[in-house]
Amino acid sequence: MNFRFITLSAVFMLLAMVLLSSCSTAVDPLPSWNEGASKTAIMEFVQSVTDSSSPDFVEPGDRIATFDNDGTLWAEQPAYFQLFFAMDRVKTMAADHPEWATQPPFQAVLEGDMEALAASGEEGLIELVMASHAGMTTDKFSDIVKSWIQTAQHPTLKKPYTELVYQPMLELLDYLRANGFTTFIVSGGGIEFMRPWTEEVYGIPPHQVVGSSIVTAFEMQNGKPVLMRQPKVHFVDDKAGKPVGINQHIGKRPIFAFGNSDGDLQMLQWSTLAGGGKRFAGIVHHTDAEREFAYDKDSHIGRLDKAQGEAEAHGWTVVDMKSEWNVIFP
Amino acid sequence: MNFRFITLSAVFMLLAMVLLSSCSTAVDPLPSWNEGASKTAIMEFVQSVTDSSSPDFVEPGDRIATFDNDGTLWAEQPAYFQLFFAMDRVKTMAADHPEWATQPPFQAVLEGDMEALAASGEEGLIELVMASHAGMTTDKFSDIVKSWIQTAQHPTLKKPYTELVYQPMLELLDYLRANGFTTFIVSGGGIEFMRPWTEEVYGIPPHQVVGSSIVTAFEMQNGKPVLMRQPKVHFVDDKAGKPVGINQHIGKRPIFAFGNSDGDLQMLQWSTLAGGGKRFAGIVHHTDAEREFAYDKDSHIGRLDKAQGEAEAHGWTVVDMKSEWNVIFP
């Protein structure tokens, strides 16, 4: 009887273990991704580089994953969110700058005339960014961004910008980290514009954020050290600048990279085409006009043209947002 | 009898546990540091910011520690080791550059004339660095550094450079990491000169190394992406550049910083004088002519003058190498 009891117990325990283990393997780490080519490619890649018996195994310290931000981790239409930040800043600062009322590009911003703003070109945009982003300490700028991101709303979607991040990409970041990857942002956006909120929103700490920057200068002000933000471009982390920024900040070549536009092409090339083991490149293709936006080769923001051709040539993964993501925003 | 046996066993076990626990608390995390002001200050600081019941508690994510390299983590006399690297490179490359035989500063290097080299000034040094550090891919440069560091020897101490690191500082790095700190190098030295070996020697991975850099440019060479090193300064991570580099790479203000010279002054100011909680600043004072080198305010390399005055004014910790370190090199 005793023996039978022990045997029965053992059988039940074994059964429970089998059930539990099959249960735990059944938990989907990417529930917002529909079964399909992209999800399969991602999961097969992660399995092959994390399985120590695989010829493609990569040591955890070398599992570097880089993500573009605008259009890859959060939305970027009808304009980069940082431009809305700059415009909101100009409106806030306008009281101290009566001359802006008749001075482009500020006049265009104050009158909400997006066409006139676009007509001011790159020069106008840089003027706008410098007026709104420079002339204060780094601490002050960080406070301004934090306060803006907590209160500002997207002009057409009427939601806080931090709710316009892509749920499938949040899951992907978590999934990679759970598999020993270190996740970095590599964005054309401002490094100091992103850092105040990327840790909370993406789980990516400031030292894992790479972006464009303006010059800062060290000063002692009344015995206190500060870094003053200067109206001068220091580094543009876009296109051919992305591999440069990756090298400068990370010092290792990513094995996994995700972008959405031609601005990410060189990052994807740098990550995957230099040889030395299995690599993954992914592109978010904005195909969902109903739930988000649909745009590619004809868009001024996030143009996807050359990179799509390269994706085809090299077998990179192109995510069809409409069919492959069952949820867009959290 | 049975009862007495159980009691005795329990007493022995209790005794063993007490002995083991007192044994484990007695393990000194900094054995190469003599008991004294510096060791006490370091350990008291770490205890106060890691004790969750302390008013000075700091979350692990904010436990940022930055270390200068030359003269702080490894030696820097009679000249920065990177200069010896540049000189060795010039000697290796000389066969392809017959014109260097009569061209300063190369002639000085090839003839081993340190006085003539010094006379060539900063301009000569930059020329030397550019000739030896630029004109190849980042991968190639990394390979060159790796191979040099494995074979080169210090000209007077006749040891590999990686054996001229300071054992007490290696222990300090380990101790901080064991207490949840993230350790960074912030050096005037070349970022790409350090990264190939800092992980192995200091346990500091490439993305936690901040340093000076030259411009790199992305290119596709026969379908392969490369970054070409250009003979142009990109960033000088020294003096007022150190807080700038820290902000650019780390994005948080350190709570613990260690240097050894006036080149570290602004890093120590930036780390400790901006308020917002308890901070630690340390300075390695080279006082041991017998076991290492003795130099401070009159030295051309690693001059320590103004920073020592500031240390006194702000109560920073100045390590007297001679009396406080019982071992210098591993």
Image: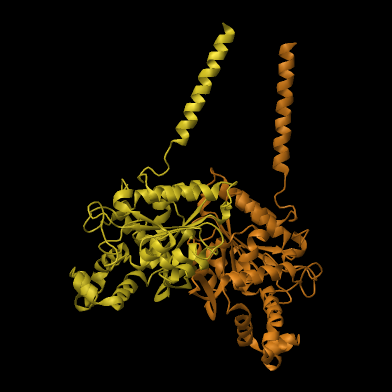
Chain colours: A orange, B yellow
Q: Quadrant of the N terminus of chain B?
A: top right
Count up the numbered dots.
0
Q: Residue at x 74, y 69 (%)?
A: A151
Q: Position of residue B277 (x, y in %)?
A: 55, 58
Name above or below for residue A203 compared with residue A307: above
Residue B101 appears left or right of B277: left
Residue B317 found in image quarter: bottom left
Residue A188 found in image quarter: bottom right
Name above or below for residue A78 compared with residue A318: below
Q: Residue at x 53, y 14 (%)?
A: B8
Q: Is residue A181 visible?
A: no
Q: Is residue B317 visible?
A: yes
Which residue sits furthest front?
B313
Name above or below for residue B21 compared with residue B215: above
Residue A149 appears left or right of A217: right
Residue B4 appears left or right of B326: right
Q: Position of residue B280 (x, y in %)?
A: 47, 56
Q: Position of residue A82 (x, y in %)?
A: 67, 74
Q: Residue at x 67, y 88 (%)?
A: A97
From the viewer's side, name the closer residue of A228 and B235: A228
Name above or below for residue B136 compared with residue A204: below
Q: Position of residue B92 (x, y in %)?
A: 26, 66
Which residue sits furthest top?
B1
